[in-house]
Amino acid sequence: MTHWHAIVPFRAGAKTRLAERLDAPSRAALAEAMAAHVLETLGRCPSIGSLTLLAPVRPAFASEGTGLIVDKGHGLNAELAAALARARHVLIIHADLPLAAPDDIAVLIDAAAGAGAAIAPDHARTGTNALAFIDANGLLPAFGPDSFALHRALLPDAAVVERPGLALDIDTPEDLDRAIAAGLLLPAIADQM
């Protein structure tokens, strides 16, 4: 079995678009709870051989076995490009996927193994929530606005994997409502709902 390396970008101060619904401590707690969930989910995937956080500092929720790439503040795509130099069998997955499950990861990796790369778009099919590829081969990630279309252009033969656990990221109050409707009610947000 080929073992894949997972990279999870994480920034504790993110989620400012949720400010109308959650105060700063609740947003931070939500971000940490979702990231811990993603790390735990990846840890339950037999095909994941190593796991690294891309973060400014090691968060308390990261286990000892989780590697750290220090985010130096050059922007997500530049930080990932540096981490991907000559990388093989890599999965980049965002930390704000509260419904992600091991089966979602397995499907994404299987699709990437078959097509060379796989892209998991967000529910609106505008953003990219996860990207898996066999060979980085100088790939410059294009996360940000319209990243799904940009990644499709960069990786035209990539499989597109659409699964609820990979599609629902939490960026806006509407996303938060979708997660709550799907049964997610983390302690971090329960008292503000």
Image: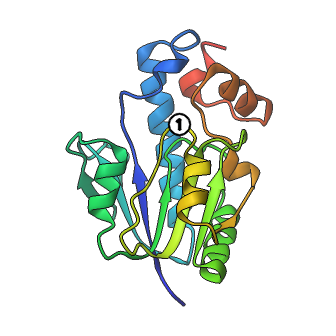
Point out the image quarter for the N terminus: bottom right
- Kind of residue at badge 1: Pro
Asked if residue 84 lies left or right of residue 40, the reply is left
Q: Is residue 73 above or below residue 165?
A: above
Q: Mark 1 = which residue?
A: 145
- The quarter of the picture where residue 46 lies is bottom right
What colour scheme does the image use?
Answer: rainbow
One can see residue 142 in this view: yes
Point out the image quarter for the C terminus: top right
- The quarter of the picture where residue 110 lies is bottom right
Residue at 42% x, 26% y: name it. 28
Q: 58 or 137, which is in the foreground? A: 137
One can see residue 67 in this view: no
Residue at 64% x, 20% y: name it. 173
| SS of the residue under disc 1 | loop
- The quarter of the picture where residue 180 lies is top right
Residue at 50% x, 48% y: name it. 94
Image location of residue 168, percent across then percent down: 68, 41
Q: 165 or 60, which is in the foreground? A: 165
Q: Is residue 69 above or below residue 125?
A: below
Q: Residue furthest top?
A: 20
Image location of residue 37, percent across then percent down: 54, 48
